[in-house]
Image (cartoon, helix red, strand yellow):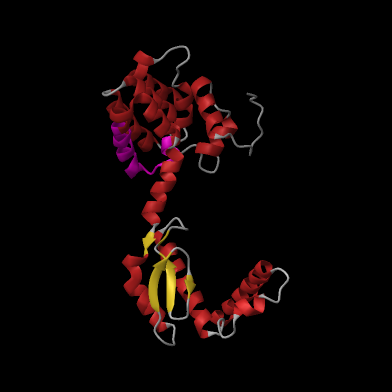
Amino acid sequence: MSDDRTIGQELNQEEVLARVRSNSLPLEELARRYGRNGRPAADALPADAIHDRLETIVFLVLSMRRSVRPSAEALAWFPAARVEALFEQIERVSRTSLDLAYQVCVFAPEMLRHLPDDEIQDWVLRLLEVYDKKGSQGCIRALQGIDEYAKTLTERRCRVRLADVSTVLDAFTLGLAGRRLRLESAEAAYTDTETLYLPETLSAFDNRDDNFRLYKATIAHLWAQTWFGTWRESVVERLQGFADPHRGLALFRSLEGLRLDARIAR
């Protein structure tokens, strides 16, 4: 693998782990992945100090092909408090398995990169449960999937359930004007002019407030279809006159969306 990558080129996860296990990542890659605006944290610990601390924990399983130096150099970009807290978790793992503790050292920079501080201890406990059931290989697979785990965690934290906010949304719908429309859950958002069908959950955004606002925006648009006459004529019959009805439907949706946006804005 060549080391002459230019700034801005990304290494995939397999390439990163190969570098971490063998030799250090280029400075540019460290800055991109772990820096804040390309710089280490103001209170970051020196790489040598981190290296000594990691070696103290897992020195019994180190070898010519197993080094914690690359991890130390990556961890030297993070705030000191985050790294100190991670030392405690690695020590916790070492009391169960030194080999697993070494693997945690290898993945430590990615753990800090993807997980918030208040989730790291739970992640480590989960990892130890995986070790009890599936051994080291199961843990390595879990560590390799830490980015996906973090995405799932974010979605879970930010997800809004229709059942939890239906009372507020029902009042919002009533306040738009016109007759009362029922709210029901469905796989996709649509209306039959009597009921507004909404997804059971929303997690499109990385915070709950925006996902709640997305529910309100969706309701406003579905209400607008009933209030501003989207269904006063048979759209299906009109589309039959197109040589390509699917393209006609796409065109109708685009133009009708613009019309409704303008009516709502007024």
Q: Is residue 72 magenta?
A: no
Up/down of 9 relative to 98, above or below: below
* 105 lies left or right of 222: left
Q: Quadrant of the C terminus?
A: bottom right
* 231 lies left or right of 115: right
Up/down of 81 relative to 264, above or below: above
Camera-nearest residue between 56 and 134: 134
- Residue 61 can be seen in this image: yes
Camera-nearest residue between 237 and 130: 237
Task: Find the residue positioned furthest to the top.
Answer: 64
- Residue at position x 38%, y 61% in the image: 160
The total of numbered circles placed on residues is 0
Residue 114 image position (x, y, % from top left): 44, 41
Task: Find the residue positioned furthest to the right.
Answer: 243
By secondary structure, the bulk of the magenta-drawn segment is best described as: helix
Q: Is residue 121 magenta?
A: yes
The magenta-colored residue range is 111-129
Up/down of 33 relative to 106, above or below: below
Camera-nearest residue between 41 and 5: 5
- Residue at position x 29%, y 30% in the image: 133
Q: Say which quarter of the image contains residue 250.
A: bottom right
Residue 35 image position (x, y, % from top left): 51, 39
* 234 lies left or right of 69: right
- Residue 43 can be seen in this image: no
Residue 203 image position (x, y, % from top left): 43, 57
Q: Say which quarter of the image contains residue 247.
A: bottom right
Residue 1 image position (x, y, % from top left): 63, 23
- Residue at position x 42%, y 44% in the image: 150
